[in-house]
Amino acid sequence: MGVQAVPADYKRFIEKKVNKMLRLQQRLDTKYEQADDRELVDIITQSKKTLGEKIVILGHHYQRDEIIQFADKTGDSLALSRYAAGQDSASHVVFCGVEFMAEAADILTGDHQKVILPDLGAGCSMADMADIDSVELAWKELSQLTDMDSVIPVTYINSSAAIKNFVGRHNGAVCTSSNAGSIIRWALGLDLKQDIKGSELVREAKQQGKKVFFFPDQHLAINTAWQMGFSTSDNVLYDPDLEFGGITKENIDTASFILWKGHCSVHQRFTVSQIQYFRNLHKDAIVMAHPECSNEVIKAADIVGSTDAIIRAVASAPKGSHIGIATEVHLVNRLANSYTDRHIECLDPILCPCATMNRIDLPHLAWIMENLTNGVVHNQIVVDEIIKEGARIALDRMLRIV
Ligand code: 13P
Ligand code: SF4
């Protein structure tokens, strides 16, 4: 019997299914690719008006200005998660950010709400550095080196829903760059109401005997631990490319932090020499850095915080001051354009944007919005129910703690 040709519509059906599973971005209709910015802005404005309260657009601070202008709410990862969790009237949430943010929104919103990511290519290279299979293997390996009952997993929100599920099911929590300190104190078994820091905090934490397994960003963990009073000898680095992560029983025994070997390539571009150069140019320099930067950069900065915290710090900085910022360039440029009475610069001379955040642009937003007015939902982010369950525990725990 000869092999039958696969019918074209069946092929298309399978292609759509595979794309959905792998979350691959389909090519936009030529209408959106060829339209100029004015036409795209008109499509989005008109669609937004038509959709009314059915739709809410969320915009992370790293988004382009042309996208931010349409956001009903802008914020850092924590603010946007809280907003998504607290609003249940809109049936569609268009998340202008990256995949892990849209997944968190899907987990935190109700079943009657659909979360949409305008470009499925908007991932996060740091989140991709910790895949669930490697994390599960690491957990097994570490259980041969230490008592896992005293290890609390904490995942940065910049991680897949599968990792959040793992963390929730192992009694851990999610954290963001603005609450990592509180979540780590909680994980170490410290009383959040007790106002201790430095050597007293470290002593108390050691007495509790807990260890934090933190992923995927080693730098956020190193910087938070350092701010609390821990030293680098309290950390061990788990490298997923090495057997047992390159960790031995001896070095895990004394450690309080097991850190996943992950990083943000945008924030690793910032260096101490950029800061020194800026300080040499300006006597009144104020340096602000996001905690995903290296510990050397954080030590050389004046103010360290999440994107929201950086925005607040700029707003309260003296007029005329020179502010050098170590974070993504779209946010820095927006601040420079909003506070023209201060001199604001990105410390990285190459001005490298977050390539994935940058994928959300006018053609993709126009395509999503106009289709929604016709009842067509593209790019819905759906987290599997089984994964949602554990991930929700980890996210809810974070929202309850801080
Ligand atoms: P924030 O939570 O500070 O906005 O950071 C998100 C992020 O991805 C930084 O790279
Ligand atoms: Fe991920 Fe870094 Fe981009 Fe943030 S800036 S979304 S951590 S790649």
Image (cartoon, helix red, strand yellow):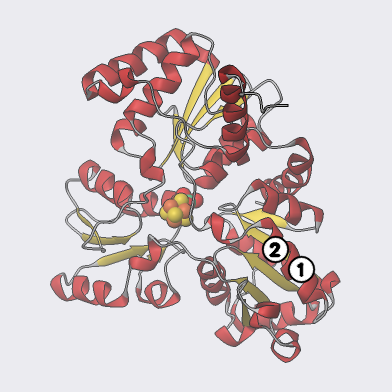
| Quadrant of residue 23 within the rendered picture | top right
Which quarter of the picture shows residue 324? bottom left
The answer to whether residue 273 shows anywhere in this view is: yes
Q: Secondary structure at mark 1?
A: helix
Look at 42% across and 67% down and name the residue there.
293
Disc 1 residue type (three-letter): Trp
Asked if labels 1 and 2 touch by Cβ distance under 8 angstroms, the answer is yes
Which structural element holds mark 2? helix
Instruction: Please say if 264 is above or below 83.
Output: below
Frontmost residue, 163 versus 120: 120
Compared to residue 187, the image places residue 11 above or below, namely above
Nearer the observer, 279 or 361: 361
In percent of width and height, residue 318 lies at: 24, 56
On screen, residue 303 versus residue 57, left or right, reads left
- Which residue lies at the image location 56% right of the left edge and 23% below the top edge? 12
Q: Is residue 378 left or right of residue 170?
A: left
Q: Report x, y in % for residue 44.
A: 36, 18
Residue reaching furthest front?
A: 1
In the rendered view, does 64 fall on the left or right side of 150? left
Tell me: residue 64, above or below residue 279. Answer: above
Q: Which residue is mark 2?
A: 135
Q: Which mark is residue 139?
A: 1
Q: Cα distance, mark 2 to mark 1? A: 6 Å
Image quarter of residue 283: bottom left
Residue at image coords 59%, 53%: 159
Q: Is residue 90 visible?
A: no
Residue 299 placement (x, y as % from top left): 40, 76
Q: Nearer the viewer, residue 36 or 278?
A: 36
Q: In which quadrant of this rendering is ligand 2 seen?
A: bottom left
